[in-house]
Amino acid sequence: MQFIDLQSQQERIRGAIMENIARVLAHGQYILGPEVRELETRLAEFVGTKHAVSCASGTDALLMPLMAYGVGPGDAVFTTPFTFVATAEVISLLGATPVFVDIDPVTFNMDPERLKDAVTALKECNPKTHPLPKGFEKLTPRGVIAVDLFGQCADYGRINAVARAHGLFVIEDAAQSFGAEYKGARACSLADVAATSFFPAKPLGCYGDGGMVFTDSDDMASVLDSIRVHGKGSDKYDNVRIGINGRCDTLQAAILLAKFAIFPEEITLRQDVASRYSELLGASGKVVCPSVSPGNLSAWAQYSVLCEDRDRVLNALKAEKIPSAVYYPKPLHVQTAYAYLAYRQGDFPASEHAAARIFSLPMHPYLCAQDQERIAATVLRSVA
Ligand SMILES: *Cc1c(COP(=O)(O)O)cnc(C)c1O
């Protein structure tokens, strides 16, 4: 059994993937070839933004808009400690400071009330009302990176309102939520800028690294276009700003075009898999199944549950050769890399509570009912 079965998907569309790869080998435009533009056009149309700028990874898709906003030393960017490290890493890479905001314990996404508290505490230099990082006295609030964890969109209605009231930009980290919906709008269209990832295991993955930035802003799109090619101006030997080599490979775009053709259907299949898990596990009372807020459609990047006896369950799954994973065992505020911010255990109780109890079960569009029944039986037997 696979945790994420990419092989079943490949078997469905191998012909189209091979044809698309062959077309790239024939035209030879390996860098920013026609498939890159085609993918940008199609995905912008799908999510409902004016622009899409593809790039080399989900991490670059977060880094580039921060660079475009001119984020640097002395700037505070609010984000969640319960996420993959890349979300906060890009803030630190630019010399800015991540200011962590605890999650909603039900959705695992940034709690808009805590965001309000954090911004106010920072503006008033008052760490008594919200935990603040070392050096907070010298920080200026600049923006927010909210994360759509496990495929469910954060509450952008409320997050954007808090940000607007304080003049902050909002970036949607949609690395796990491509294909999700929030109140009738698609993930990647919910903030000033959104970043997604095409890492193979993400809902829409390529066969290597890739990412994309989405925005309605013409200015942002044109700066991103420059940043991804070393800060180019009129051409790549005219350098008007500091940029990176952040391009998406034509071959990866060609593969993604073949995968995107069946992507909407796969999102539907993911709903079926998730509902079946919830039916099988929900009634036990021993496992807390994921909860999707009204108006949301999750992309189900992960099916993550909470259990008081996590180690027992993980061992039982392992004994049955059923793959599982823990996203994430250690929140960022207690990671060694962030020791310099001098946060303490206890600062973000909802993140710490989730990190101690959460684990993810196999999740992909091709997971069959028999496998799910075996997984659920193993989980339930181990908590009985
Ligand atoms: C995967 C992921 C990223 C980084 O994407 P890469 O393509 O691996 O660079 C960023 N944020 C979150 C929440 C992710 O899950």
Image: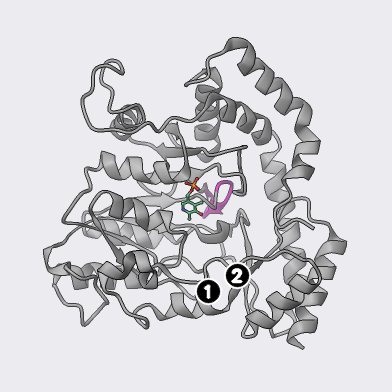
- The x, y position of residue 354, in whole percent, is 52, 76
Residue type pointed to by label 1: Val
Is residue 278 shown above or below 69?
below
- Residue beneath the point at 42% across and 54% down: 86
User: Quick one: 176 or 120, which is closer to the camera?
Assistant: 176
Q: Disc 2 beta carbon < 8 A from ligand 1?
A: no
The residue labelled by disc 1 is 106
Say how the picture is coloured: one colour
User: Quick one: 372 or 239, which is closer to the camera?
Assistant: 239
First in sequence, mark 2 or 1: give its number: 1
The image quadrant where one finds the N terminus is bottom right
Q: What is the span of residues highlighted in magenta in the rendered image?
A: 178-185
- The x, y position of residue 384, in whole percent, is 77, 88
Do callouts 2 and 1 mark residues in contact (Cβ within 8 Å)? yes
Residue 60, magenta (yes or no): no
The residue labelled by disc 2 is 291
